[in-house]
Every structure is written in C-alpha cells, then in structure tokens.
C-alpha cells in the first residue's frame, strides 16, 4: 500500500450473529488443518484465513480491538435489510466493544424503500445512543430517505455500489484482445481506477446532502483517489469485491419452479445463507454467486493510490 | 403510448423510414467522437455499448441522423449513459452533450448523477431522460432526481421491476414526470444499473461467461463453528450438508437456464423469429402500461435484425389494447408464452 498512514480498520458483517461471535470470525487456525480440509471447508472459509493472515502482516495481531468501527447490514437484497431488533443488538454489541457503527442498506425497489422508512426510528435511536451513527446507502432512494431525515446524529455515507467503477473477475485488462483503436493501456487503466467523486459540483451537491464519504472496492486494476474532491473521504472494501446482481435471485432460483426464475413478487427461502454457486475458471479471479449477487475474491489489497482512510474488512461475503 | 427504438451507427436514412412506418415514434443513438476514442480507446464507451458500429462517430453523422428523424416528424435522443465519469471522462462527456444540444437532439439519456449535476452547472440545458442505469426503482428515487436535477422530462424504469412495482411507481409519479418501460427483448439476468462487469465487444458478456460451464453449487462444509471442528475433521460430511448438496447439485444444471436460451423449439422461420429476435415477450403488459399512464415502451438494443417486425407487433398490441389471449394469438405459439420467455411472469 502506498499511503504513509494505514487506513483505519473496520469490520463488515451482514448478520447480527457474526457481531456477537466476532472472535470466531477473526480466529486463525493452523495452516496445516486448512490445507488438509481446504476442499471441504469451501473457498470462502479459506479466504477468511488467508485474508486474516494478510491483514495481520499489515496491522499486526488481529482481534476485536483492532477495529474502530463495524459496518453492519447488506448491500444487494432488500429482503436482508436488518430489522429494528437487529439494529438494537448491533448497537449494544458495538457499544460493548467500543466500536462506532455504520448501518449498511441495500439498493431498493418500492418494498425495500418502505422497509427503510420503517427502520428510521431505530436508526435515530441508534444515533441517540451512540452519539452518532452512519448509514451506508447504495442508491438515490436510500440517500433521499436517510439524508431527508435531517438528523445530525444520522450521517449518510455512500456505499460501494454508488461508485460504479468497472469490476470484473476477468481483469487485468491486458488479458483482453485489443481492437484496432486500442490506445496505450495506461490511459484505459487510469480511467477505470477513478470515480465520479473527482467532479467538484457533484461533490458539493453531496456535501449539501450531508455526504462526505464514499465506498470503493479494492479493485484488481487498482483505485486512484488522488483527484477526489477535497473534503470527501473514501472507504475501501476487501477482500470480497462486488461485481453484479439481479432482482431474480439465482441461488433462490435453483430451488424455485422454472417459471419463477425471473423477477416475481414473492419467493425466497434464504437459500443465499445455505448455498452458493462457484465459478472456477482459470482466466478469472475466483467468483461466487451468493444470493442475488456475484462476488469475486481479490486476494491482494492491490495498488491503492491517494488517500483512503478506512479499510473495510469482510471476513465473509456480506450476505 | 409511444414506441422507442434504438438505432446503431450503421443505420442510414433509408433504414429509418421503414421503422417509422412500422410504428416507431422515437429513436435513440450513441455518438462517440474521436476526442473520446483518442483518450479512452474503444474499451471505454460513453454510452455503455463499446461495440464496433454501434455509435455514430462524427458530429456530421449524428446531425444527419437527427435531421432525418426530425424530417419524419419523430423524436430522437442521444444516449450518454455510462455508469461512471472521472474528471477526464466528464470533460469529454460534457462536450458530447453540448454537441447533442447544438445538433438538436430532443433529449439526452443519462444515468450518472454526477454527469447530470455537472452538465446543469456547466449550462448544458438539453432535457434529460434518466436511463435504466439511473436505478430509479422507486418513487423515492424518482423524487430524488426531480428535486436535485433540473430538466428531467422522462425516467426509464429498470427492467427488473415487477408489474406490481411498476403500477405503484406509475401511480406515484403521475403528472410529475413521464415514464418509459421495457416489455420486449432480452432482459439480462443482472440489473443494468448495478452491473459493473466489462460489457464490451472485446470479451464475452459476463453473464454468459458466468453461466457457462464449469460451475457447481455447493454449501460450505463444517458450517457454524468450523474453526473449532477443523482439527478433528475426518473428511466426513454432515447430514445437513449432504441434504443441501444433493438438492443443490441436482438443480445445478438448471442454473444456467436463468439467462440462457430455453428449450423453446425452433422448428420454422416463425419460431426462430420468436426465439432469437423477440427472445422475451411482455406484449400483454402493454395494455396495463397504457392504462397506468406509462408514456413509452422501448424496443431495446441498437440495430438488430427484423426490428420492423418487432415494432409492428408492439404497435398492434398497444393499439389493439390486447388482452393476454390476443397477445398469444399475435405470438401465434402457445408454448412461447409459458415459462421463461415471459418478460414479467404475467400470471396465466
């Protein structure tokens, strides 16, 4: 990592049970045992171990005290929006551990928008109890609701789906065939490392909505925040990179009747928390469809230029 | 309800009239000037279609197609709907919008909030249509756009919405902004507005790449407290894991069929037309869209074969206010209307 100062370490979990069992999430087990069982424990668990080891190289021993803040929630499915009681438990655990709290909400359609509105009293209460609470939103609907609360103790931040940089397990770019109009690779790479948050009028608008922070993934092509407008801070999420998602949940679709595999009003048996679809192709980063989204593992934190002040560590895919 | 049709950079004057005669009311195009290509190559496109010949390449070409459509009494829009614009891309994207304004396009189709805000600040006044990529999936999202960006005249609803959701949004947006929806063509398994994969001629579509073999479904072994159990793990599989794995694996092959071609039988020219050109059909939703006040329906993809035929079918369904039975007669093949070829899973 190029930055002189290490970003503040934060923990991202999607289930309240994970907050309660945080020590288990962060436990390192013997590499010999992992190697012996790697085929059976699944890549996500193997990644949990390898990422923890990488983190320890950067930050020293990793335990619950290593984290300043917990990100709690889910980014891609409105059915997984935390309940009021989940938020209440997250507040209790955060306060007991001395963490600050960021509640993570997904992008939403009408059903999800109503759920977020219904959650607002619990979010306000969380802000009151903790002094302040952040809410990471993924779309303009979420931003509108949270920013519209105009509550100084509830701070809207932009989740990583708001930074719509290219993410593709088939990167790096030089593995792709070049067309007749191909220009030097550096110019393409340079632009796909950067974000819209370099544009000052846009950022000023975000400031007026109370937003001073946005999220990005630790992309294989690297990220470059050197030109990000002043006063805007950035989070980087690692090691699970969001790639894409659909309303029709592919994992749920596996157990659904054939006719229900495109968007329908009601179907979900929380298959996302029981199984996943792995994609293993030699020319791509390891990818997995979990729930309605596809995620890729980026084993290295990568080339991060510029000023990023939080590293959001995902011990497991946040689903 | 109008029919909106995308056209590619190879479309000439003589090709447009048949589309109008078939029923097209509005058009949209991509325009990639040399100034963009010189900086960002062909891989990065200002309108999310980095394919050869999909976009017009010069101001003159873009003006010619715009003038042609206007001479036919129809409207034409300029798509500048890439997801992300860093400051370098933003500068050229603003120039593209300025060109669009000079040429006289009726609106620009945009998806990036930063571009909308920067454009207005820079004095670009061309009306905006919020692209599917804007993710306006709720009344709250629509409110946000209308409150924060002047000059939005239309919003394109993401195609992942259900009929019930579209009705709710249409009710709430009534009288405030025009809406456009999809009802025919190939809806991707993924949401355009949240798909950040490389969508380019230079490589296979990510969805096709993902859904093709090899793939397999699995549930993690040693669930729960696996770290404590791993030291004594003897390779045996828990009963729970065995049940989940068996169920999942038996269905694994079906996963690909979410987005891949279904088992629809291509037995003659008609069935090939339905299967490959129409692909997914929501004709029977059009009557409802019309009743709910949706202003326009899109025939997506720029270019493509037999589009006048597709437009004619859409026109007949709208003008006739066809009920599902009438639409099925129009399709002419009851098997097509079952299962995965139905755009909105309209209950039979």
Image (cartoon, coloured by chain):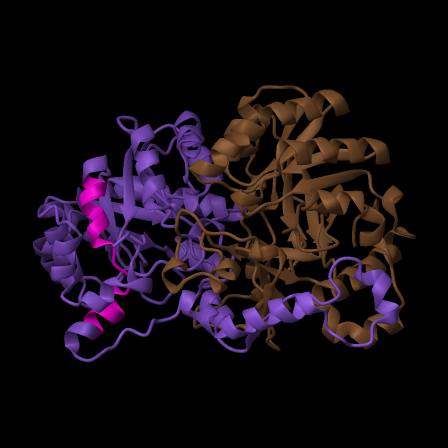
Chain colours: A brown, B purple
At x 47%, y 44%, the residue is B91
Please, which residue is most extreme toward the front here? B239
Q: On screen, A34 above or below A63? A: below
Please, which residue is most extreme toward the right here? A61
Does the image show residue A143? yes
Image location of residue B100, percent across then percent down: 30, 44
From the viewer's side, name the closer residue of B260 and A81: A81
At x 62%, y 19%, the residue is A151
Q: How many marks?
A: 0
At x 30%, y 47%, the residue is B78
Q: On screen, B249 above or below B131? A: below
Image location of residue B58, percent across then percent down: 30, 56
- Residue A90 lies left or right of residue A180; in this view the side is right
Image location of residue A231, percent across then percent down: 67, 31
Quadrant housing residue A232? top right
- Residue B176 lies left or right of residue A38; in this view the side is left
From the viewer's side, name the closer residue of B133 and A121: A121
Image location of residue B277, percent across then percent down: 24, 67
Residue B178 falls within the magenta-colored stretch? no
Q: On screen, B240 above or below B296? A: below
- Residue B165 lies left or right of residue B279; in this view the side is right
Q: Quadrant of the N terminus of chain A?
A: bottom right
Q: Main secondary structure of the magenta part?
A: helix
Residue B274 falls within the magenta-colored stretch? yes
Instruction: Specify the segment rendered in magenta.
Output: B272-290
Does the image show residue A201? no
Q: On screen, B172 above or below B244? A: above
Quadrant housing residue A227? top right
Please, which residue is most extreme toward the bottom here? B267
């Amino acid at each position: 990592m190029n930055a002189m100062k290490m970003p503040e370490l934060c923990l991202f979990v999607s289930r309240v049970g994970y907050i309660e069992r945080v020590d288990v999430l962060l436990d390192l087990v013997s590499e010999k045992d992992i190697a012996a069982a790697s085929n059976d424990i699944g890549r996500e668990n193997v990644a949990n171990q390898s990422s923890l080891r990488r983190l320890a190289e950067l930050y020293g021993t990793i335990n619950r005290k290593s984290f300043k803040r917990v990100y709690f929630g889910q980014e891609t499915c409105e059915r997984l929006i935390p309940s009021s009681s989940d938020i209440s438990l997250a507040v209790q655990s955060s306060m007991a551990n001395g963490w600050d709290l960021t509640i993570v909400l997904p992008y939403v359609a009408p059903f999800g928008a109503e759920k977020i509105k219904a959650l607002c009293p619990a979010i306000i209460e969380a802000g009151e109890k903790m002094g302040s609470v952040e809410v990471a939103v993924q779309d303009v609907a979420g931003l509108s609701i949270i920013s519209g609360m105009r509550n100084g103790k509830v701070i809207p931040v932009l989740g990583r789906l708001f930074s719509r940089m290219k993410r593709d397990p088939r990167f790096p770019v030089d593995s792709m065939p070049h067309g007749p109009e191909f220009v030097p690779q550096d110019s393409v790479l340079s632009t796909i490392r950067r974000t819209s948050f370099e544009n000052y009028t846009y950022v000023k608008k975000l400031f007026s909505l109370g937003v001073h922070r946005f999220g990005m993934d630790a992309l294989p092509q690297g990220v470059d925040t050197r030109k990000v407008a002043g006063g805007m801070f950035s989070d980087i999420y690692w090691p699970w990179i969001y790639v894409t998602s659909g309303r029709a949940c592919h994992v749920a679709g596996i157990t659904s009747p054939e006719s229900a595999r495109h968007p329908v009003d009601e179907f979900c048996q929380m298959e996302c928390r029981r199984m996943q679809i792995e994609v293993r192709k030699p020319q791509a980063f390891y990818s997995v469809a979990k729930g309605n989204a596809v995620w890729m593992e980026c084993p290295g934190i990568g080339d991060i230029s510029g000023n990023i002040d939080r590293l959001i560590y995902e011990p497991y895919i946040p689903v | 309800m109008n029919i909106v049709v995308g056209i590619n950079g190879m479309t000439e004057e003589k090709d447009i009239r048949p589309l109008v005669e078939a029923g097209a009311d509005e058009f949209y195009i991509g325009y990639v000037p040399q100034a963009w290509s010189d900086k960002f190559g062909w891989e990065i496109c200002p309108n999310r279609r980095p394919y050869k010949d999909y976009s017009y390449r010069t101001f003159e070409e873009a003006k010619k197609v715009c003038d042609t459509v206007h001479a036919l009494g129809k409207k034409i829009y300029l798509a500048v709907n890439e997801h992300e614009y860093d400051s370098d891309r933003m500068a050229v994207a603003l120039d593209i919008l300025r060109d669009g304004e000079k040429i006289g396009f009726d609106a620009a189709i945009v998806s990036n909030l930063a571009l909308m805000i920067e454009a207005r600040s820079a004095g670009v006044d061309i009306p905006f249509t919020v692209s599917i990529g804007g993710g306006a999936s709720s009344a709250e999202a629509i409110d946000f756009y209308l409150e924060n960006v002047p000059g939005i005249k239309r919003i394109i609803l993401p195609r992942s919405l259900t009929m019930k959701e579209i009705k709710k949004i249409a009710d709430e947006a009534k009288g405030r902004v025009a809406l456009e929806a999809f009802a025919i063509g190939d809806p991707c398994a993924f949401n355009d507005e949240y798909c950040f994969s490389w969508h380019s001629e230079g490589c296979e579509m990510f969805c096709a790449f993902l859904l093709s073999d090899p793939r397999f479904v699995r549930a993690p072994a040693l669930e729960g407290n696996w770290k404590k159990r791993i030291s004594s793990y003897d390779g045996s599989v828990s009963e729970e894991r065995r049940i989940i794995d068996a169920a999942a694996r038996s269905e694994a092959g079906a996963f690909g069929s979410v987005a891949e071609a279904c088992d629809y039988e291509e037995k003659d020219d008609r069935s090939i037309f339905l299967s490959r050109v129409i692909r997914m059909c929501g004709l029977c939703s059009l009557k409802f869209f019309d009743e709910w006040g949706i202003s326009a329906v899109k025939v997506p993809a720029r270019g493509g074969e037999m589009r006048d035929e597709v437009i004619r079918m859409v026109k007949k369904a709208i003008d006739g206010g066809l009920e599902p039975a009438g639409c099925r007669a129009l399709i002419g093949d009851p098997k097509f209307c079952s299962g995965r070829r139905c755009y909105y899973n309209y209950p039979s």
